[in-house]
Image (cartoon, rainbow, N blue to C red):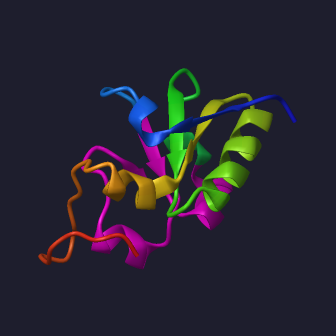
Amino acid sequence: MSDFHTVPVHDIPADAVILDVREDYEWVAGHADSAVHIPMDQIPARLDEIDPDEDVYVICRTGGRSLRVAQWLTGQGYTAINVSGGMDQWLESGKPLVSDNGLKPLVL
């Protein structure tokens, strides 16, 4: 596979395309407001929802799933950047979260 990059949360540009690959229950509990949600196991079937001309910052809870997805997307010709530390680091960095369940957002 081709090379891909890993960046910490604080290096994600403000206008970045963020791809959250966590499970539905994790997404509902708390996510970045501007993120796109496609669970890891659905990426191949939903690849057409990802713009191949955009840099994509891939995030999960801690960085393991996003690493695998970033590797795979890069192998498919996308520019995918893994976000180290994931949503745990997002929360610790004080970045804003929203939830889809009406409760205070949190990272599961």
In the image, is residue 22 part of the stretch drawn in magenta? yes
Going 55% across and 61% down the picture, which residue do you hit? 62
Q: Quadrant of residue 4?
A: top right
**Towards the viewer: 68 or 9:** 9
The number of callouts visible is: 0
Q: Residue furthest right?
A: 1
The residue at the far top in this view is: 53
Q: Quadrant of the N terminus?
A: top right
Is 25 magenta? The answer is yes
Start-end of magenta stretch: 17-46
Residue at the image point whose x is 40% and y is 35% from the top: 10
Question: Image quarter for residue 106?
Answer: bottom left
Between 106 and 39, the one lying in front of the other is 106
- Residue 60, compared with residue 13, is above or below; it is below
User: Could you tell me which residue is drawn at 12 percent across and 76 percent down?
Assistant: 102
Residue 78 lies, in percent from the top left, at 66, 30
Residue 105 lies, with reference to residue 16, above or below; the image says below
> Residue farthest to the left?
102
The percent coordinates of residue 68 (x first, y second) are 72, 53
